[in-house]
Image (spheres, rainbow, N blue to C red):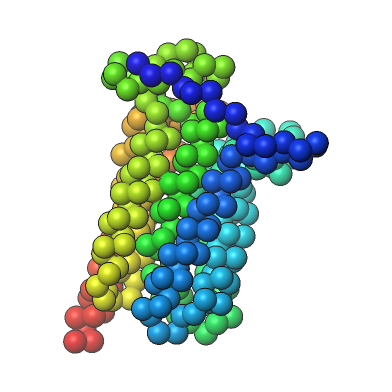
Amino acid sequence: MLKYPHIDPVLIKIGPVAVHWYGIMYLIGFGAVWLLGNRRARNRSGWDEQNVSDLVFYGAVGAVLGGRLGYVLFYNLDSYLEHPLNIFHIWEGGMSFHGGLIGVLAAMAWFARKTGKRFFDVTDFLAPMAPIGLGAGRIGNFINGELWGRVTDAPWGMVFPGTEAGGLPRHPSQLYEAFCEGLLLFLILWIFSRNTRPRMAVSGMFLLGYGAFRFLLEFFRMPDAQLGFIAFDWVTMGQILSVPLIAGGVILLVLAYRTRQAND
């Protein structure tokens, strides 16, 4: 059994200003996307450093706004209706990937229109790098001591003291997600996108990969306390929201390769 290492969620505090690890993780994620984006741009016509910088800026705004609004709407609406100012307390956690995805897609549509690029060319460019940001966000969840997993007797079960986890050993599901949705998905997409793929294929692989990983990992993660299980005493909100991603990924992959075959 492991014990949570008591990481202070505040990295540094100067007077009334506190810098939280959660925010630092987002900065690390966006910075990694910028660095990798510049590397990808060198091998792709129509992309330069200014495009990448703009892409990261639009994506960051879409991810933060969409992620926060998604969490408010999908996971904890009643609480935020009672305390609306808490919506702005992003440093306390409470971001929804599915809401963030919607926000990023909206931002990418705006970016594509502004630059005259095709929407799926933009998403295919961004998709292989996005998991780095997702993994960093999950590390932020771990540092905050939130979104822990279900009770387990596995030797790597972790006790999260000082939380509602009840002092019981639980799956460190934040780390599972950081590995699968972050590092592993990044490697899959980076290798997959190294060869020329038909338009929509990389985007489809991202949706399929994330949706599948998230659906499976929800079996190790505790459902949000304010929601519990949505159906059958095992279906969670995360799984419900991941099903359209899996379906959308399969559809995009089929369309991508059918379109290429029709054009060959």
Residue 88 placement: quadrant: top right
Residue 78 placement: quadrant: top right
> In this picture, is 93 found above or below 123?
above
Note whether residue 81 is visible. no
Residue at the image position 53 percent from the left and 58 percent from the top: 31
Q: How many marks?
A: 0
Q: Residue furthest top?
A: 167
> In this picture, is 45 found above or below 11?
below
Observer-nearest residue: 247 or 100?
100
Observer-nearest residue: 31 or 178?
31
> In this picture, is 179 found above or below 57?
above
Residue 176: x, y in percent?
36, 36
Residue 140: x, y in percent?
52, 39
Residue at the image position 35 percent from the left and 30 percent from the top: 220
User: Which quarter of the rendering shows the N terminus?
Assistant: top left
Residue at the image position 55 percent from the left and 82 percent from the top: 115
- Is 144 positioned to the left or the right of 219 in the image? right
Q: Residue furthest right?
A: 15
